[in-house]
Amino acid sequence: MKTQIIAIGGGANSPYPIEQYILKQTGKSRPKVCFIGTATGDADRNIVRFYEIFGNFDCDRTHLALFSAPKDFESLLMQQDVIHVGGGNTKNLLAIWREWGLEKILYRAWQQGIILSGGSAGSICWFEEGVSDYIPSELNPIKALGFLKGSHCPHFDTEPNRRPRYLELIANGTLQAGIAADDAVALHYINGELHRIVSGAPNAKAYQVKRIGNTAQETELKPDYLNNET
């Protein structure tokens, strides 16, 4: 069974080529997509935003709100073709998922071929570790689910402290080598390996970052610009 994760550096720009790309990977004419907004406490505005964005495409949309005391969310999730996770507080997201046992269900879904996707916190969560602003105005390392190897940093181009902090944490050995993504960049993993990098913006990039001695070395990875690819 092919496993897929599509981790997005952040942002959603009309006409939403990355979201369209995600749906295309299902191979379904009308895929089922479920949004999980745990990282913002299931905020209504983000749930509505999900329905608006994915409403541009031929898909069946639903959402899982853990703060509404769901009864059988495993059944709901295992019926999906895509599980899409919103941004917000990564630490809260992971803590709540672990309390509900959701990380085990998501792992089973992934192993059964359901595409896992998301941006920001919804991107960091799939890796072993990353850098997160779960404490406001700070950027700290965080251990995540480990479905994907290595570390991850989203918002590499839009939040000015992200790049230097990520490089610092890799240079001093706090974080292991990993991959950073600008907003509008998606990292598509198949069977745990990076398969393709795509972008909804022409100048957005990704970067492989590793430790060399006591410094961090960036290698630019140019994405395939989707340019409204269908």
Image (cartoon, helix red, strand yellow):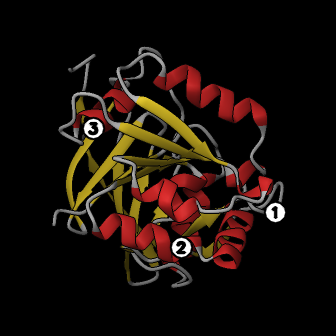
Residues at marks 1 and 2, CA–CA distance in whole angstroms: 22 Å
Residue drawn at point x = 26 percent, y = 58 percent: 189
Q: Which of 169 and 80 is in front in this view?
A: 80
Q: Which amino acid does label 1 sit on?
A: Ile
Point out which mark residue 103 bears: 2
Q: Which residue has dot 3 on it?
A: 198
Q: Which residue has dot 1 on it?
A: 135
Residue drawn at point x = 57 percent, y = 74 percent: 169
Q: Is mark 3 on a helix, strand or loop?
A: strand
Residues at marks 1 and 3, CA–CA distance in whole angstroms: 30 Å
Q: Residues within 10 Å of mark 1 (few under 14, many from 20)?
A: few
Return the x and y of residue 225 as percentages of the image width and height: 25, 27
Residue drawn at point x = 74 percent, y = 46 percent: 42
110 relative position to 14: left or right? left
Screen quadrant of the C terminus: top left
Residue drawn at point x = 60 percent, y = 77 percent: 101
Q: What residue type is labelled 2?
A: Glu
Choose the circle earlier in sequence order: 1 or 2.
2
Return the x and y of residue 213 as percentages of the image width and height: 39, 84
218 relative position to 134: left or right? left
Residues at marks 3 and 2, CA–CA distance in whole angstroms: 26 Å
The answer to whether residue 103 of the structure is visible from this angle is yes
